[in-house]
Image (cartoon, helix red, strand yellow):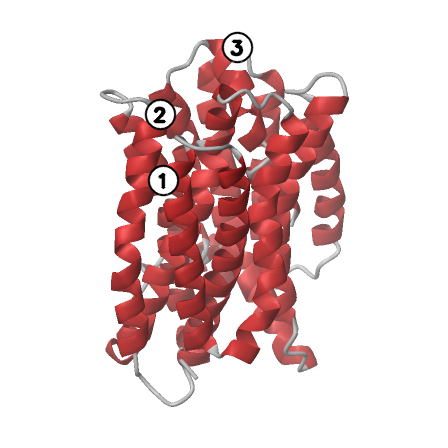
Amino acid sequence: MVLTAGAYLPSPLYPGYQEAFGASDLFMTLTYATFALTSIPALLFLGPASDALGPRTVLRWGIAAAALGSLCFVLADGPGWLIAGRAVQGIALGAATGAAVSLINSGERASGDGRAKVRACAAFVGGTAAGPITAGLLAQYLPAPHTLPFLVHLVLLWAGWNQVSALRKKEGASLRQWRPTRPRVPAALRPVFRAAASTGFLAWTTAGLFLSVIPTLLDRAGQKDLAVVGGILGTVLLCSLLAQPAVPAMGLRGAQLSGLVALLVSLILLAFSFWGPTVLIAVAAVAAGAGHGLAYGGASAAVENAVPPEQRGAVTGALYIAFYSGAGAPPIAIGLMTLGSSLGTATALVAAAAATAVPVAVSMVRSARPGSRAMA
């Protein structure tokens, strides 16, 4: 939770950084996307390290990298620091994801408690919500708006370091045992995986639009209250958190389909919100959050139910690549489009393009029938 919160602390602060450093829209969108561009290779290369070295070692690497990322923002006196901070934050979360999954799976097997993954998913999304909300409140009402949030994060990381250090160290750990592997999806699981990856990609695409460019667009529309901006961003993830408990009751296919419909509504509202009242963005945030929770929760659980335990690491790694790509690709596209159009127009066009992909994902979810329990 602390790591994901830190990764999204900068979101409501981007307009201030852009004004202070005179950065272009393209640079700022690439700054946000840098997180995804570094977290994906970190997930591929550092994820399997927990099997050789143990979760404690890799989680400590992740915490150290996250601390370095926050220090980059504390020391930032130019736009290059922002890129460096986002890059290290991506490495931190990519490294910690595999170790955290390994730790949760081993604890679940030992205790027989099936709620561990639910809590972990809630912590992941809850941290994502806590980051922009906390940063917005601290920046609006306390001094040093571009420093204090990251100093608070450093204190929380120190507490996390102490907790992780209390874990038992893996005996006989050696770097020679570490073999980075590429994600593999068995042929029998590909229908479910493709449906889940497409659904999760669109869920994180929609959330990524809010966490990357919406703060700047709100600022240009006259919304200068950072607490309000952080609250709108946090609403997306808080609504997601509230929607996820409904996934088992709706069924995994039903949750994904309902989530995709809500995402479609949000994307349409977002595409038109830049030429209408600002309240449309708030309504779009609620729809995006509900859709994200159902789509992301259903997609993750569908793959989790379908994959055999011995293949879970490789398949889960491939699924998270789709999630991170969904969050990172749209800001890059928007940034490139700003070379010839305004930020609002570019965002509206990308939102409209994502909306056209929703029916394709719906079709994939409806046709995925790999087995009796994966999509029940």
N-terminal-most mark, 1 or 2: 1
* Percent position of residue 44, x then y: 38, 53
User: Which residue was labeled with disc 3?
Assistant: 20
Q: Which circle's residue, 1 or 3, is located before the other in the chain?
A: 3
How far apart marks 3 and 2 lie (CA) works out to: 18 Å
The secondary structure type at the circle numbered 1 is: helix
Q: CA distance from mark 1 to mark 2?
A: 12 Å
State whether residue 209 appears in this view. Answer: yes
Residue type (three-letter) at the residue carrying disc 3? Ala
**Of labels 1 and 2, the one closer to you:** 1
Residue beneath disc 2: 343
Q: Is residue 152 left or right of residue 229?
A: right
> In the image, what residue occupies the spot 38% across and 66% down?
314
Q: Residue at x 69, y 36 (%)?
A: 134
* Image location (x, y in percent) of residue 22: 44, 9
Asked whether, in this view, residue 148 is left or right of residue 8, the answer is: right
Secondary structure, mark 3, is helix
Residue at which label 1 appears: 271
